[in-house]
Image (spheres, rainbow, N blue to C red):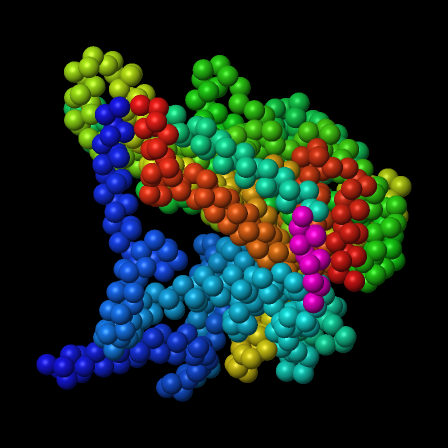
């Protein structure tokens, strides 16, 4: 009860400010629009100058975005309809054949499945573990900041360096991991953790979890700071147990943070490249190929730049669709003005 | 007030503008642009370890000393890194002036795109003594690069470990190889290391088996017509599969890299962890870089040719191999051609041979090869009735890549002899 009221207050105030935005489509406030328009007309010369000023100051950023994001995207689309070896002029136009080649390629469809496994696996592993660690670290204890640092260190490490270290640790026979478990009487897989097709993807997932758990914990901890302590006090007064407090107060209020983290994790998993490339190069037997590693090896190893570009466009579209639908169906509830969300609850109450 | 702020804005605009434009300008200038009369030549090579690296630095200095106003920018890179960077360089059109070409389909593509200079005229003197060895870098009678090292692939082995396991004679037939591997295993020694993580080291087994199985004419036709329909290619796959099934390879070979680090295939051989490895002429140099004393296997280094396969149509003395040649970028200055020529001169090649950096192509430098294993390989190379370029080089990256991928799958137990042929043919058909 209490949290919803508190939320409502904050949301109502925020939705008020939203309404203050001049909204030309709205028909409910014709008078206000007119007055705004009149104001605009009066202040036009000043506005023009202001717009120019804005344009001037954001243009460096715009230029950078155009050169390093828009242009490459357009280039990729252009390359994807040609048969091109990576140098020389673009002459051999093949239409959508490259797309067909990519989508009919089992290695690529498997790569998509690997990406999906990594998305699911990352969330399934990092969410409970990260949340658990964040809740533990949120309690007052002596070495709190040291523990937080330790958990966060893997994330700070460059992905390539972490990959090289794990590659050495996971060497069959001579690696640290195999040495340790053989001391415990367990025999590591004969081909090694990264050399066995059935295990390689899970090993990569484990390393990724180690690497990105820190980010999840830090984000969750930040989210926890935003939970007002009065709620805890009130709950304690009402006699709620620690578990009840976490379940009914902390986790629901952590919702927006969890959803944002889920988004970051999903996009990261979709574009996964560095760690896979360092650990396995997409092998053994293509068992860890991701969409990104597929397109890089098609491009740089086989010089089928047209096919690689088609794969990159497909990856872009897949990521875009997933991102937009996530925004639409999951994240929207965090940003929309919240009458609809709170109304049913009110009825209930 | 107003004018003041305006001046300030104009200044800011001018400053930003000049920053932007200077950014553009520095991006587009040419490396050869001479400001004070010096010509800069960029040179990329892959001798990034120990003595070889130092030697090439000395070579560049010597050349600078005899050629006034020439400045050579030397870039030593790890082999795979260099290939990646070269691809990027070809793409941008900003190729280094002197770089390495491996011939075959790769070179043909670069020539077609107008990236590589025709050296037939300017290096006619050198081509006289290089003779046949330059064949792999000739297209339509024109030579596009000067080979400085040409070698056959074969098995490098650790003589001490062979002795320990009671293998007295280097294997000569396929059965000998299987027997030797068996003996080594019984002695508790891992017989062979292979860097199947990089794919091409695994693919070399199939290439060589195909050279043994296919008749000379069949091989030549398959390269020109991109045709793998002959049954000998399937047989090659079956031979390799037979070897794989005896499990002679180092644990984790599917993720083992070819030559980077002590846990790579070359590293395992160099540090005495395995008894042999199928590799090219570069192996002693690579092993030297991977051992602390810089000597590799030293006196224990042995070499034997890929064994004969019973019933094969190919000449058992034929060799699979490849070489490295210095090519010059189309837009490079004449001094770059001079430098490429200098690199195959007697003086440079002798030093190159003395350090066992490869197998020299200049006949006058052949006697300088110190390593007995390399000498034995050079004999085999010079006596071979014919020489087949590595398939991935000969067929070009696209077909070669498809082939290598499928062969790596065979090593993982996820493919078969027929699928290798099919995948190669599919990729070849897309090229036609």
Over which residues does the magenta segment extend? A93-103
Q: Is residue B398 left or right of residue A76?
A: right
| Residue ID at (55%, 47%) | A318
Q: Tell me which secondary structure the magenta stretch mostly adopts.
A: helix
Q: Would you say residue B187 is visible in this rendering?
A: yes
Residue B388 lies in quadrant = bottom right
Q: Is B288 colored magenta in this rendering?
A: no
Question: Could you say where residue A126 lies in the image, as x and y percent from the top left?
Answer: 40, 30
In this view, the residue in front, B339 or B238, is: B238
Left or right for A130, reference B15: right
Q: Is residue B270 visible?
A: no
Residue A133: image x %, image y %? 31, 26
> As drawn, is A340 to the left or to the right of B263?
left
Q: Residue furthest left?
A: B1
Is B234 left or right of B94, judged from the image as shown?
right
The quadrant of the image that shows the N terminus of chain B is bottom left
Task: Note whether A298 is above or below B93 in the view shown.
Answer: above
Q: Residue at x 68, y 71 (%)?
A: A91
Q: Nearer the viewer, residue A226 or B341?
A: A226
* Residue sitting at x 77%, y 37%: B416
Which sits in the foreground, B207 or A208?
Answer: A208
- For residue B71, above or below residue A341: below
Depth check, front residue: A31 or B313: A31
Question: Looking at the figure, which quarter contains the C terminus of chain B?
Answer: bottom right
Could you say where residue A69 lies in the image, as x and y percent from the top left?
45, 61
Q: Decide: is A72 above or below A328.
A: below
User: Which residue is drawn at the image coordinates 42% and 84% (left, top)?
Assistant: B34
How many marks the image carries: the answer is: 0
Q: Does the segment drawn in magenta span residue A99?
A: yes
Q: Residue furthest bottom?
A: B37
Identify whether A52 is placed above or below B105. below
């Amino acid at each position: 009860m209490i949290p919803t009221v508190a939320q409502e207050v904050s949301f109502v105030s925020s939705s008020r400010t939203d309404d203050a935005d001049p909204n030309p489509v709205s028909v409910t406030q014709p008078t206000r629009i007119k007055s705004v328009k009149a104001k605009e007309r009066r202040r036009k010369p000043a506005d023009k100058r202001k717009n120019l000023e804005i344009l001037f100051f954001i243009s460096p950023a715009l230029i950078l975005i155009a050169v390093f994001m828009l242009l490459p995207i357009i280039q990729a689309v252009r390359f994807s309809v040609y048969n091109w070896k990576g140098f020389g002029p673009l002459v051999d136009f093949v239409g959508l054949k490259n797309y067909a080649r990519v989508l009919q390629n089992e290695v690529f469809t498997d790569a998509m499945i690997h990406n999906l496994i990594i998305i699911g696996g990352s969330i399934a592993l990092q969410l409970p573990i990260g949340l658990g660690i964040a809740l533990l670290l949120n309690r007052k204890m002596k070495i709190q900041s040291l523990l937080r640092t330790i958990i966060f260190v893997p994330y700070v490490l460059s992905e390539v360096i972490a990959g090289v270290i794990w590659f050495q640790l996971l060497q069959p026979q001579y690696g640290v991991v195999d040495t340790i478990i053989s001391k415990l009487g367990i025999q590591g897989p004969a081909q090694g953790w990264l050399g066995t097709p059935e295990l390689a993807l899970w090993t990569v997932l484990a390393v990724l979890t180690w690497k990105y758990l820190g980010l999840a914990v830090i984000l969750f901890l930040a989210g926890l700071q935003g939970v007002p302590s009065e709620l805890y006090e009130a709950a304690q007064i009402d006699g709620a147990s620690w578990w009840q407090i976490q379940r009914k107060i902390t986790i629901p209020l952590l919702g927006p943070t969890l959803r944002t983290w889920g988004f970051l994790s999903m996009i990261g998993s979709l574009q996964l490249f560095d760690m896979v490339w360092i650990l396995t190069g997409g092998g053994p037997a293509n068992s860890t190929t991701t969409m990104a590693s597929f397109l890089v090896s098609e491009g740089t190893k086989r010089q089928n730049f047209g096919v690689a570009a088609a794969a990159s466009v497909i990856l872009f579209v897949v990521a875009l669709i997933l991102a937009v639908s996530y925004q639409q169906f999951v994240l929207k509830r965090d940003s929309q003005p919240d009458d609809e969300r709170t109304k049913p609850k009110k009825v209930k109450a | 007030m107003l004018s003041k702020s305006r001046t300030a804005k104009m200044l800011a605009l001018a400053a930003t503008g000049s920053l932007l434009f200077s950014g553009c300008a520095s991006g587009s200038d040419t490396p050869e642009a001479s400001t004070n009369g010096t010509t800069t030549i960029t040179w990329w090579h892959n001798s990034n370890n120990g003595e070889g690296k130092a030697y090439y630095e000395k070579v560049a200095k010597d050349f600078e000393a005899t050629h006034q106003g020439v400045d050579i920018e030397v870039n030593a890179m790890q082999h795979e890194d260099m290939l990646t960077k070269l691809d990027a360089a070809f793409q941008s059109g900003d190729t280094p002036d002197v770089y390495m070409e491996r011939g075959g389909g790769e070179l043909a593509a670069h020539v077609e795109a107008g990236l590589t200079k025709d050296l037939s005229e300017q290096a006619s003197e050198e081509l006289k003594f290089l003779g046949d060895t330059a064949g792999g870098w000739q297209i339509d009678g024109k030579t596009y690069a000067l080979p400085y090292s040409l070698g056959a692939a074969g098995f490098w082995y650790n003589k001490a470990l062979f002795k320990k396991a009671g293998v007295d004679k280097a294997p000569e037939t396929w059965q000998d190889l299987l027997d030797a591997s068996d003996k080594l295993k019984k002695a508790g020694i891992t017989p062979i290391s292979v860097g199947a993580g990089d794919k091409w080291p695994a693919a070399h087994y199939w290439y060589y088996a195909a050279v043994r199985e296919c008749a000379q004419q069949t091989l030549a036709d398959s390269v020109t017509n991109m045709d793998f329909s002959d049954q000998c290619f399937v047989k090659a796959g079956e031979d390799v599969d037979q070897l794989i099934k005896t499990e002679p390879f180092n644990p984790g070979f599917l993720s083992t890299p070819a030559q980077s680090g002590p846990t790579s295939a070359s590293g395992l051989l160099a540090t005495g962890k395995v008894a042999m490895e199928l590799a090219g002429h570069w192996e002693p140099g690579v092993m030297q870089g991977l051992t602390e004393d810089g000597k590799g296997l030293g006196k224990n280094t042995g070499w034997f040719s890929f064994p004969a396969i019973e019933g094969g149509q190919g000449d058992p003395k034929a060799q699979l191999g490849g070489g490295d040649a210095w090519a010059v970028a189309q837009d490079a200055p004449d001094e770059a051609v001079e430098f490429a020529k200098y690199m195959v001169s007697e003086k440079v090649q002798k030093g190159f041979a003395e350090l066992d950096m490869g197998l020299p192509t200049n006949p006058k430098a052949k006697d300088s090869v110190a390593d007995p294993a390399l000498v034995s390989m050079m004999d085999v190379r010079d006596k071979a009735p014919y020489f087949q370029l590595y398939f991935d080089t000969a067929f070009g990256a696209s077909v070669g890549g498809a082939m290598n991928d499928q062969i790596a799958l065979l090593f993982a137990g996820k493919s078969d002899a027929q699928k290798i042929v099919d995948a190669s043919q599919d990729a070849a058909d897309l090229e036609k």
